[in-house]
Image (tube, rainbow, N blue to C red):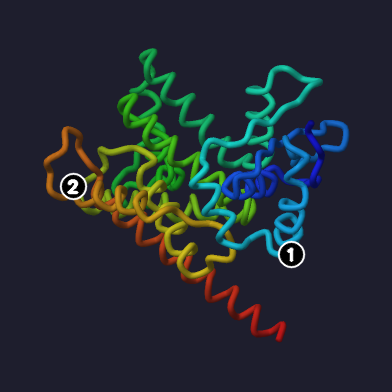
């Protein structure tokens, strides 16, 4: 018989605890309590209560311990969230994700809308408004939104799906942990830096969110190394895969044209932002002492 173990306000932390308990061979599920807007981690076997209780107590003391995030990655198939009063779980999960990561969702929606409009024959007018222009032309017309515009344009289904999957996975985690304002800042800086780099290296005919994707990748990579207690990191094989993809782009052996300068500049800018955030957090820590 199921037994409630602990109530947690944030879905992310309920997931982390459930994943860790599962890694310790304790069968649990996460139940959404809509009335209280909280998540109940419950035991599916009451006999595990004595084993689970000290784990919960330790989690409450240090929920950002890297071991919980590691367990979440290893048990990536998330514990089912059951809501007896609302059967449409997929819609509810989607709405919960949007509430936790509104800017990430806004970029997903915008890129999807642009891509769908492009498929029905409106690519040319969209590109005329969003594509970047030479710097001299931008200085004359002041259409500075074009520094961000290429990030919203995708040229194929594979291009679109690859970039948006990474954006949702990494951007959502950053926004949930560090806030919407920070993700907006990260998006703007990495988009501008990567688009300018590609403009200088190869001219204005390019598009895609991949410069930003490499920016958020670089940020997660470095902040996970510099601040592991924050619980924002990636497994080393995932980082290795993305770096290999970057190298293969320079080797020019892939079946697609790669915006190599945008990828590299985005990665470096994301790493730099993580470094400055780490320094800023360190300064605040010293002032508290």
215 with respect to 69 (left or right): left
Q: Nearer the viewer, residue 1 or 270?
A: 1
- The picture places residue 157, in percent across and down from the top left corner, at 34, 24
From the image, tell me which residue sits under label 2: 248
Location of the N terminus by quadrant is top right
Asked whether 51 or 75 is in front, the reply is 51
- From this view, report whether residue 236 is shown above or below residue 148: below
Residue 256: image location, x then y, percent: 20, 34
Relative horizontal placement of residue 173, taking residue 203 as reference (left or right): right
User: What percent of the width, then of the height, locates residue 158?
Assistant: 32, 28
Report the residue at 53% width, 57% height from top. Answer: 232
Tag shown at residue 61: 1
- Residue at point 43%, 19% (across, down): 117
Q: Residue furthest top?
A: 120
Q: Nearer the viewer, mark 1 or mark 2?
A: 1
263 vs 54: above or below: above
Q: Earlier in the sequence, mark 1 or mark 2?
A: 1
The residue sitting at 64% across, 35% down in the picture is 98
- Mark 1 neighbour density, 10 Å: few (under 14) some (14–19) many (20 or more): few
Question: Which image quarter holds the C terminus?
Answer: bottom right
């Amino acid at each position: 018989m199921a037994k409630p173990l602990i109530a947690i306000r944030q879905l992310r932390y309920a997931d982390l605890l459930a994943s860790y308990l599962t890694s310790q061979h304790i069968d649990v599920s996460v139940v959404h309590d809509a009335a209280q807007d909280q998540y109940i981690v419950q035991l599916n076997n009451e006999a595990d209560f004595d084993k689970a209780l000290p784990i919960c107590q330790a989690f409450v003391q240090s929920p950002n311990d890297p071991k919980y995030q590691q367990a979440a990655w290893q048990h990536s198939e998330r514990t089912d969230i059951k809501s007896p009063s609302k059967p449409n779980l997929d819609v509810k999960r989607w709405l919960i994700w949007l509430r936790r990561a509104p800017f990430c969702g806004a970029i997903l929606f915008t890129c999807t809308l642009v891509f769908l409009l492009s498929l029905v024959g409106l690519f040319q007018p969209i590109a005329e408004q969003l594509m970047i222009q030479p710097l001299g032309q931008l200085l004359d017309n002041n259409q500075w939104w074009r520094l961000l515009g290429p990030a919203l344009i995708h040229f194929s289904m594979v291009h679109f799906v690859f970039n948006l999957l990474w954006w949702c996975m990494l951007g959502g985690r950053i926004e949930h942990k560090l806030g919407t304002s920070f993700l907006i800042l990260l998006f703007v800086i990495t988009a501008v830096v990567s688009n300018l780099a590609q403009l200088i290296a190869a001219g204005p005919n390019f598009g895609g969110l991949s410069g930003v994707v490499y920016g958020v990748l670089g940020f997660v990579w470095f902040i996970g190394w510099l601040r592991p207690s924050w619980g924002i990191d990636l497994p080393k094989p995932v980082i290795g895969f993305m770096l290999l993809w970057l190298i293969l782009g320079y080797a020019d052996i892939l079946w697609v044209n790669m915006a190599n300068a945008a990828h590299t500049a985005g990665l470096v800018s994301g790493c730099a932002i993580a470094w400055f955030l780490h320094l800023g957090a360190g300064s605040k820590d010293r002032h508290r002492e």
